């Protein structure tokens, strides 16, 4: 999961920003306790309907 690598590197440099990472499977993602407080990882499959919690959240 290369997306989480750059977020983990960038997050401490931008502590007032929340980083959201998405993947179809988080099986290879680092454990939540290893992530900076401002990094969130979630499952998102673009072949399935979008979960209502994400509608209108991002531009």
Image (spheres, grey):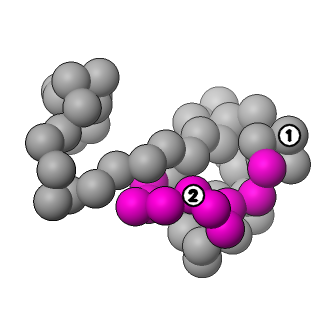
Q: Which picture quadrant has residue 22? A: bottom left
Q: Measure the alpha-carbon separation of dots 1 and 2.
A: 14 Å
Frontmost of labels 1 and 2 is 2
User: Which mark, residue 8?
Assistant: none
Residue at image coords 79%, 50% = 31
| Left or right of 25 in this view: 40 | right
| Left or right of 1 in this view: 59 | left
Magenta segment: 22-31
Q: Main secondary structure of the magenta part?
A: loop
Q: Residue furthest right?
A: 34
Examine the structure image and report whether residue 24 is included in the region drawn in magenta.
yes
Q: Position of residue 51 (x, y in %)?
A: 24, 32
| Left or right of 8 in this view: 25 | left
Q: Position of residue 20 (x, y in %)?
A: 49, 45
Give the residue pinned by disc 2: 26
| Left or right of 9 in this view: 54 | left
Give the residue pinned by disc 1: 33
- For label 2, the crowd category at 10 Å Cα-Cα, with few meaning under 14, some 14 to 19 and many 20 or more, is some
């Amino acid at each position: 999961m290369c997306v989480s690598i750059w977020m983990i590197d960038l997050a401490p440099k931008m502590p007032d920003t929340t980083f959201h990472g998405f993947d179809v499977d988080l099986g290879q993602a680092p454990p939540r306790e290893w992530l900076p407080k401002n990094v969130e990882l979630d499952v998102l499959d673009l072949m399935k309907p979008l979960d209502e919690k994400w509608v209108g959240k991002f531009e």
